[in-house]
């Protein structure tokens, strides 16, 4: 059995909306289990509509939120082991890339100062000269250079260029895992494929795994090794990207595939699932049953357990579409 770089074991996150007396509990992430092997770098895309729990799950991996239930294990080290937690080592191993690159840099500071700060503050470089070499190498790996970037401010870059700088900053630590939360959402359509192409190149060059959180299913199809679909906080389908997107097993995944046919397109919230209701997060049976065209009485009584399809696929459904098609 392959060793795991990342294990997400039965993780849940609950938020309270409103006051203490009349407030409601929202299960933003509901008993999610996922893993990434350490022997081969991969790109795992986590997809789903707004409010499905993608970013909350991302923030728990980054230690920005604490799970209310379950555990996350990074390179054999449990997040529950507070005494064994080394903040510096964690920053070296795990790096984020956020949605809007302009929010990651102050308009008052040149962008190269952030890269130098990362190299020097985390002890990767001993002095300015060493840092210059590291920063230049990282920038060249994303199609830029220190000579091009030096002394310039965020407003002097396009969104795509600045996102490349963000990626270069993440690479300076030589991380084992990069978590990219909607990294192409704020970028022009013409630049989206350049960024996702870069992820594929860097995965192989630096042997780094990516968690790619996205609305953009067409880029997910192109860049991913594996895809995990979330719905109302639940992981409803997981497996190899091509298999899932060519032949989805869950009705919700099928709905998403039909809604986004082209590179750069997103599904609109009112296109796929209008009238999102808080109560759907707290449903104890299948959360998609109220909207599912294939739902039966069984689906409305109890939440299904995971069904295995082949060696690597899992689906949270009583009536997986792949199995149904195989019978016909």
Image: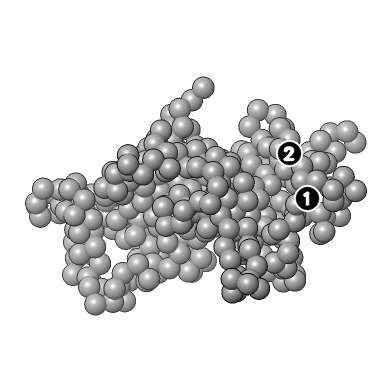
Q: Which residue is drawn at 75% across and 52% down?
A: 284
The number of discs equals 2
User: Going from the N terminus, do you reach mark 2 or mark 1 first?
Assistant: 1
Q: In the image, 133: left or right of 289?
A: left
Locate residue 103: give its quadrant. Answer: bottom left
SS at badge 1? loop
- Are discs 2 and 1 less than 8 Å apart at CB? no
Q: Please say if 281 is above or below 174.
A: below
SS at badge 2? loop
Give how far across and how far down residue 19 sits, in percent. 59, 74
Q: Please say if 144 is above or below 87.
A: below
Look at the image and tell me whether residue 271 can be seen. no
Give how far across and how far down residue 307 sits, in percent. 73, 35
Look at the image and tell me whether residue 324 can be seen. yes
Q: Mark 1 points at which residue?
A: 285
| Neighbourhood count class around disc 2 (C-alpha, 10 Å): few under 14, some 14–19, many 20 upward | few
| Neighbourhood count class around disc 1 (C-alpha, 10 Å): few under 14, some 14–19, many 20 upward | some
**Quadrant, the C terminus:** top right
Give how far across and how far down residue 156 sits, in percent. 29, 75
Q: Which residue is drawn at 43% across and 42% down?
A: 80
Q: In the image, 185: left or right of 162?
A: right
Residue 190 marker: none
Taking depth in this image into account, of 187 and 226 the one nearest to the observer is 226
Q: In the image, 281: left or right of 222?
A: right
Q: Report the Cα–Cα distance between label 2 and label 1.
A: 10 Å
Q: Residue at x 81, y 41 (%)?
A: 318
Q: Which residue is drawn at 48% across and 48% down?
A: 211
Residue 305 marker: 2
The colour scheme of the drawn protein is one colour
Taking depth in this image into account, of 320 and 204 the one nearest to the observer is 320
Q: In the image, 108: left or right of 54?
A: left
Taking depth in this image into account, of 292 and 141 the one nearest to the observer is 292
């Amino acid at each position: 059995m392959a060793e795991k770089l990342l294990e997400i074991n039965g993780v849940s996150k609950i938020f309270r909306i409103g006051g203490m007396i009349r407030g409601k509990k929202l299960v933003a992430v509901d008993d999610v289990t996922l893993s990434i092997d350490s022997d081969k770098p991969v790109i795992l895309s986590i997809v789903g509509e707004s409010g499905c729990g993608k970013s909350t799950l991302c923030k728990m991996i980054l230690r920005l939120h604490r799970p209310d239930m379950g555990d996350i294990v990074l390179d054999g080290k449990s997040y529950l082991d507070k005494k064994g937690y080394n903040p510096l080592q964690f920053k070296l191993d795990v790096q984020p890339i956020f949605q809007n690159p302009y929010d990651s840099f102050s308009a008052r500071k040149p962008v190269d100062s952030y890269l130098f700060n990362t190299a020097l503050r985390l002890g990767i470089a001993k002095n300015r000269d060493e840092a210059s070499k590291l920063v230049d190498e990282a920038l060249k790996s994303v199609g830029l250079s220190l000579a091009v970037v030096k002394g310039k401010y965020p407003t002097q870059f396009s969104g795509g260029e600045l996102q490349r700088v963000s990626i270069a900053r993440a690479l300076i630590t030589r991380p084992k895992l990069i978590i990219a939360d909607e990294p192409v959402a704020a970028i022009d359509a013409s630049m989206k494929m350049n960024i996702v192409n870069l992820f594929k190149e860097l995965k192989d060059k630096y042997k780094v795994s990516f968690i790619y959180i996205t609305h953009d299913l067409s880029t997910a199809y192109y860049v991913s090794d594996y895809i995990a679909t979330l719905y109302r906080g639940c992981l409803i389908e997981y497996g190899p990207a091509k298999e899932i997107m060519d032949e989805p097993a869950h009705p919700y995944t099928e709905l998403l595939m039909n809604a986004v046919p082209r590179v750069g397109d997103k599904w609109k919230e009112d296109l796929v699932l209008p009238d999102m209701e808080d109560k759907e997060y707290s449903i104890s049976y299948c959360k998609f049953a109220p909207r599912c065209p294939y739902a039966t009485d069984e689906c409305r009584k109890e939440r299904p357990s995971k069904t295995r399809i082949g060696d690597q696929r899992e689906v949270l459904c009583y009536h997986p579409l792949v199995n149904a098609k195989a019978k016909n």
